[in-house]
Amino acid sequence: MKKFSNTMQTKLTQLLNIKHPIIQAPMFLVSNVVMVTEAMKAGIAGCIPALNYRTLDELRVAIKELKANKVDGGSFGFNLIVNKSNIKYKGQLEVICEEGCDFIITSLGSPEETIRQAHAVGIKVFCDVTDLKFAKKVEQLGADAAIAVNNEAGGHRGNLTPEQLTNLLSTELSIPVISAGGVGCKADIDNMLSYGAEGVSVGSPFIASIEASVTDDYKQACVDYGAEDIIMTERISGTPCTVINTPYVQKIGTKATWIENLLNKNKSLKKWVKMVRFSIGMKATEKAAKKATYKTVWVAGPSIEHTTAILPVKDIVYKLTN
């Protein structure tokens, strides 16, 4: 078995000029400039969802701060939702390309326009994929790497196991494969690399970081709950998403309402229903993340099984690499 070590170089470490083949995954409401700065100092890459910023001016300021904080051995990027549910997409892409960063991660749509504009200014593009068909498509479009979102990922996840998906993509693609999901300790990284991955994307373990932009209750939940407490719900964005099975989640259920199902069957209304559901779900998630509330919807993946304390980002990276 190929094993990860502190000195191991992979295609991901070479692409991003980082010390360890790890991306601190972009997490809605959780990721911030301080988290990513600490990730860079620890020798990994950090990524923030562009949607974490309400305005383009706030996004621009964040990029400038990260550029000022950048150190050798670390890199930073932004995540873009590239489908029609994100009405801010074009403006976000424009600002990111104007200001510059090391990489962009695309999700939930075609990355064609992002790849074209980002490559024109020297920004690399990694694309979330859950199957071989879409992975082949993004490769043809010029993606620099495929992020293999498996069935152990937090948030919106794929259907294949880490081994199945990573083996498949690393065999069929010529671009590097980054495994996303199911990584909570160094042994997990060793496994992903043995399946053919050139690196990993790690999210949920960083929720319980001191620097994360969420409540202490959310962070403590990632300590107190484990892999068996992660379930799928359709009540946040309309697309199945993993959350911690809190009493409130149990109360409201995990399936879309009958009227949502009915409207989703109408082709002319389906897009608008998804946009409304996405907006409502994101606002509910924001309330849970930012303040104490009985209406608690906490997004996380099964890798919180290895989270035993709220720690600084640098300590979490150390645990992942030693």
Image (tube, rainbow, N blue to C red):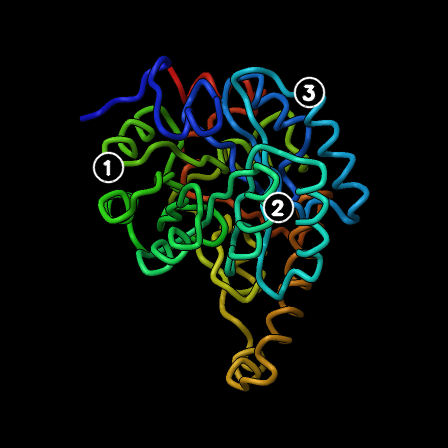
Q: Which mark sits nearer the N-terminus, 3 or 1? A: 3
Seen from the viewer's position, the closer of residues 247 and 245 is 245
Q: Amino acid at mark 1?
A: Tyr
Q: CA distance from mark 3 to mark 1?
A: 34 Å
User: Could you give the CA–CA distance between mark 2 and mark 3, rounded to whole angstroms?
Assistant: 22 Å
Q: Secondary structure at mark 1?
A: loop
Q: Tell me the tag on residue 297.
A: none
| Mark number displayed over residue 195 | 1
- Measured from the top left, where is residue 237 in percent x and y? 58, 62
Residue at the extreme left of the image, as rendered: 1
The reply to whether discs 2 and 1 touch (Cβ–Cβ < 8 Å) is no
Residue corresponding to mark 3: 69
Residue 82, horizontal then vertical, whole percent:
58, 57
Query: Left or right of 170: which side holds 43?
Result: right
> Considering the image in quadrants, where does the N terminus appear?
top left
Q: Nearer the viewer, mark 3 or mark 1?
A: 3
| Rendered location of residue 125, percent (x, y) | 51, 43
Q: In this picture, is 217 found above or below 10?
A: below
Q: Are marks 3 and 1 in contact (CB under 8 Å)?
A: no
Give the vertical position of 88 relative to 298 (above or below). below
- Give the residue drawn at x 35%, y 38%: 176
Identify the secondary structure beneath mark 2.
loop
Residue appearing at x 69%, y 45% in the figure? 52
